[in-house]
């Protein structure tokens, strides 16, 4: 009997019972096959992490807030929520016609077929009306890449979903002038850093590199690091990458600490006494402002 595995299943059953035990769509009983149940986030914008593995390997109360954002679905119903299920229902006739072509050709379809003049005109008109490649493909039943190729041949501007995003350029400029990186701004608006960079360039901005954005932050980086703050936290505070932080430290001949070097001056006997008093590695680490691994490494190696 695998006690650890059984405990994980029990934790999963507890979370399943908390959300009502049965699939919200089809009524499947989650206690019959708990591993077949999924936690579906009702609003994907509020999702912070996947719940299932966290529940099985952690403590329920730590993830309760995230579980409250979910509804219980069986695997089949969950796949319908996240797949091309609706497209399949709406375009069955077209899909089966392509299936027949595949059967006749032995699994090969030439997508570079010849288009009629009317089809090409329709593609161009829909593109000029503001439809994206996906929308044109869906409405006409023509493959996505074929639509794109026809527009390129006609030297037409291709409108994609990213171009349609409603991003306020004034907000981007404000955040950028506050020394935020392109990546951090991109995360705020849900787009890539390249999209943010392109918007700024179109507005006449020169994109700064990490080094250009340091400015007075170089002294701050050194100050925070000398206080014992780890590199990843200094990176977040000063709004530059960890790579930039490390290079600033190297440039100023500051030795970069390893995970347990801060504890070199702490007597191992003191740590052993704290452990005997019942303090966990995490509690000891918090007292000395280092990672749990730093304490564990020092005590195990008697550094």
Image (cartoon, rainbow, N blue to C red):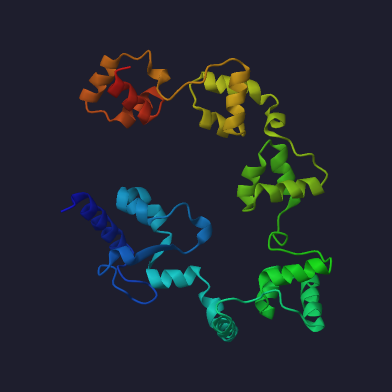
Question: In the image, what residue occupies the spot 40% across and 72% down?
Answer: 76
Residue placed furthest toward the front: 106
Using the image as rendered, state which of residue 151 and residue 13 is in the foreground. 151
User: Is 85 placed above or below 283 here?
Assistant: below
**Number of on-image labels:** 0
Q: Quadrant of the N terminus?
A: bottom left
Q: Position of residue 158 (x, y in %)?
A: 77, 64
Residue at the spot 33% in from the left edge and 76% down from the top edge: 27
Residue 273 vertical position relative to residue 45 in the rendered view, above or below: above
Quick check: can you spot residue 222?
yes
**Dividing the image into 4 quarters, which one contains the C terminus?**
top left
Position of residue 164 relative to residue 2, above or below, is: below
89 with respect to 70 (left or right):
right
Q: Quadrant of residue 293?
A: top left
Would you identify the image quadrant in which residue 32 lies? bottom left
Q: Nearer the viewer, residue 112 or 84?
A: 112
Estimate the x, y position of residue 45 in percent, counting from the top left. 53, 58
User: How far across and how far down the image is residue 232, in percent?
Assistant: 52, 32
Q: Nearer the viewer, residue 219 or 120?
A: 120
Residue extending farthest to the left is: 1
Q: Is residue 29 above or below residue 99?
A: above
Residue 82, image x, y percentages: 49, 68
Residue under the image location 68 percent in, 72 percent down: 135
Does residue 130 show up?
no
**Taking 234 as reference, is 205 left or right?**
right
């Amino acid at each position: 009997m695998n006690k650890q595995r059984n405990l994980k299943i029990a934790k999963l059953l507890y979370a399943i019972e908390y959300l009502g035990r049965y699939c919200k769509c089809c009524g499947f009983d989650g206690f019959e096959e708990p591993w077949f149940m999924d936690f579906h986030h009702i609003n994907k914008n509020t999702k912070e992490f996947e719940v299932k593995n966290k529940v099985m390997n952690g403590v329920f109360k730590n993830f309760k807030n995230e579980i409250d954002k979910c509804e219980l679905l069986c695997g089949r119903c969950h796949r319908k929520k996240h797949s091309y299920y609706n497209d399949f229902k709406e375009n069955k006739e077209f899909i089966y016609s392509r299936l027949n072509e595949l059967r006749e050709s032995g699994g090969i379809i030439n997508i570079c077929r010849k288009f009629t003049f009317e089809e090409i005109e329709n593609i161009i008109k829909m593109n000029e009306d503001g439809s994206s490649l996906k929308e044109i493909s869906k409405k006409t039943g023509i493959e996505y890449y074929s639509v794109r190729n026809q527009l390129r041949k006609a030297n037409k501007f291709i409108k994609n979903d990213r171009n349609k995003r409603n991003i306020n350029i004034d907000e981007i400029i404000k955040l950028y002038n506050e020394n935020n990186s392109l990546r951090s701004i991109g995360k705020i608006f849900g787009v890539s850093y390249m999209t943010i960079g392109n918007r700024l360039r179109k507005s006449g901005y020169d994109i700064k590199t990490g080094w250009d954005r340091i400015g007075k932050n170089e002294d701050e980086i050194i100050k925070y690091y000398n206080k014992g703050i780890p590199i990843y936290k200094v990176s977040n505070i000063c709004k530059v990458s960890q790579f930039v932080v490390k290079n600033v430290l190297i440039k100023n001949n500051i030795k970069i600490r390893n995970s347990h070097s801060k504890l070199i001056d702490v007597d191992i006997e003191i740590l052993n006494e704290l452990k005997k008093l019942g303090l966990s590695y995490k509690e000891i680490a918090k007292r000395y402002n280092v990672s749990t691994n730093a304490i564990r490494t020092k005590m195990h190696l008697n550094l």
